[in-house]
Amino acid sequence: MQLLSSYLAGAWSAGSGSRTSLVNPATEEALAEVHTGGHDLAAAFRHARTKGAAELGQMTFAQRGAVLAALAKAIHGAREELIALAVANGGNTRGDAKFDIDGGAVTLSHYAELGAKLGATTLLADGEPIQVGRTARMGGQHIWARRAGVAVHINAFNFPAWGLCEKLACALLAGMPVIAKPATATALVAHRLAQLFEPLVPAGALSMLIGPAGTLLDNVGATDVVAFTGGASTAKSLRTQLAAKGARLNIEADSLNAAVLGPDVELTSETGGLFLGDIVRDMTQKTGQKCTATRRVLVPADRLGDVCDAMKERLAAIAIGDPSRDDVRMGPLATAAQRDDVRAGIDRLAAVTDSVHGGTGDVTPIGVAAGKGYFVGPVVRSTKAPMDCAPLNEHEVFGPVSTVGSYDGSAAFAAAFIARGEGCLVSSAYSDDRDWVTGFVSAAAPWAGRLFLGSQKMAAQSPGPGTVLPSLNHGGPGRAGGGEELGGERGLHHYMQRCALEGDASVLKSLLGG
Ligand code: NAP
């Protein structure tokens, strides 16, 4: 049995004490073990703060970007091996695994290109020069300088590659050393990435703790940054734990994303086809374990039956089973705990909604021994009172589960429904009526980190709402954690300090390479 090591303070170490197993969620076979502690985490922070910060501090954006390009290349070189690990340890189909792994490489490449564009400098301008004196000689300029300290990245189980890479790309390009902590249950992919990346990054720039967090956060100081992706209850405890320390905390937590069908859209139209394709893909890709997946669907009352019928038809064609098989389109949930959570969420919904498809998720998976694996089949529920449905609007079911509600077709109701989720990462609306879209966006935007506007003219090149792009903001208000990641250059700001400079305008200009 493979025993996984952590990479801390410039060395690989297995830790000590009790062990926990990483399993294949389709077969429940143990794949590897990891010690639950025994690491000198204080030494890891010291090493990152001294060696890592010093090495990155000597580099320009262009040089750091070149490092990111090398990491993306390393992923391409080991792609098949990484896909096999994701299939075995994550319950991913090959398509799911590619979505995670290629997404990681694309994000690294995006920030590599941004580094090249920012060039041979170390400071970023924040806005235009300002005249603060009597004449133009006395100037002001806001800048971004890299933050002192360490970036601690705590990642969720669902995207072990992309989650690592999207946070790492922004922090390293900004110039902060990183200590990453992948979720233990699916850590095989992140562990292999650390092995691939370690020789390619400056000394001390990347450390990785494999296994539970233990005393990790006890070492966080005021100039450090913690970026967390995971459940709302863990997020809450991190807020309490870190508040007194003054560290910057970015949280991406639960999200009740919604998809709205505009009143002008026929299901047989291109826009209608985009809507159906997106909601079914979001339910089944990664078995619905995507932070961006649609949990709540809103359709005009006269289209409720047609939408439910179309979803049933599409979902019935999805083969569920051992994700290593070519004929399987949807695998198991990642852990037994996630399966139990999803089943509890379905039961809560079943008490107040009507069954459309999949009952309460029982399924006989293809190619799996009887009783084995953490499988739940796709489940669609429906309600004619979506606003009043507390289990729908107040609890994220992190699996292949969606509920379709009916509405009066007004943009005001649609936006109020988005707001009912109390803050989401992304929601989508499908309409070719620009007046309706304008009314919807202005009322819904305060409740979403991203709004996806599906229409006939963009349908042919749409990535869908479930795909997070490095150039656009990822994060959301309220329940979604209040964080922001990515968004091109904006993603660096989390790891940088804004500083207002005052002085001779020509000196200020020269500091920014002018
Ligand atoms: P989680 O239990 O919050 O775990 C997320 C990460 O936090 C893991 O790396 C976990 O490590 C770590 N962690 C747990 N307790 C910690 C602590 N006290 N201090 C520091 N780190 C700690 O979430 P999960 O089990 O991955 O998922 C639970 C729910 O979160 C899901 O059902 C879903 O609702 C939501 N979720 C949201 C997103 C999103 O992107 N928005 C993603 C995934 C999950 P270990 O793995 O070692 O415990």
Image (cartoon, rainbow, N blue to C red):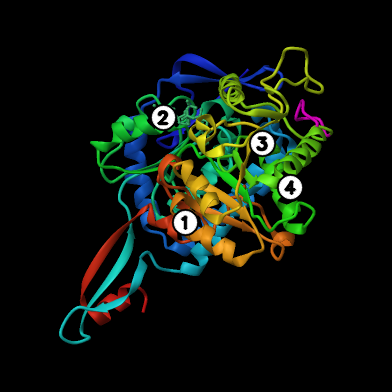
Label 4 and label 2: CA atoms lie apart by 33 Å
Q: Residue furthest left?
A: 134
What residue sits right under mark 4 in the picture?
Answer: 277
Q: Is residue 208 left or right of residue 26?
A: left
Spot occupied by residue 288 in the image (x, y as percentages of width and height): 64, 35
Q: Amino acid at mark 3?
A: Lys
Residue nearest the viewer, comparing 347 with 223: 347
User: Circle 4: is it few (<14), some (14-19), or many (20+) Cα within 10 Å?
Assistant: some
What residue sits right under mark 1 in the picture?
Answer: 443
Does label 2 or label 3 sit earlier along the sequence?
2
Q: Residue at x 71, y 66 (%)?
A: 457
User: Circle 2: is it few (<14), some (14-19), or many (20+) Cα within 10 Å?
Assistant: few
Label 1 and label 4: CA atoms lie apart by 26 Å
Q: Amino acid at mark 4?
A: Gly
Label 1 and label 2: CA atoms lie apart by 30 Å
Spot occupied by residue 509 in the image (x, y as percentages of width and height): 31, 78
Q: What's the magenta bit mostly, secondary-structure-wise?
A: loop
Spot occupied by residue 25 in the image (x, y as percentages of width and height): 66, 22
Q: Secondary structure at mark 1?
A: helix
Q: Residue at x 47, y 42 (%)?
A: 420
Answer whether residue 388 is visible to the viewer in this image.
Answer: yes
What residue sits right under mark 2 in the picture?
Answer: 234
- Tag 1–tag 2 contact (CB < 8 Å): no
- Tag 3–tag 4 contact (CB < 8 Å): no
Spot occupied by residue 508 in the image (x, y as percentages of width and height): 27, 75
- Report the quarter where the N terminus lies: top right
Q: Is residue 425 left or right of residue 327?
A: left
What residue sits right under mark 3 in the picture?
Answer: 286
Q: Which residues are magenta?
A: 319-326
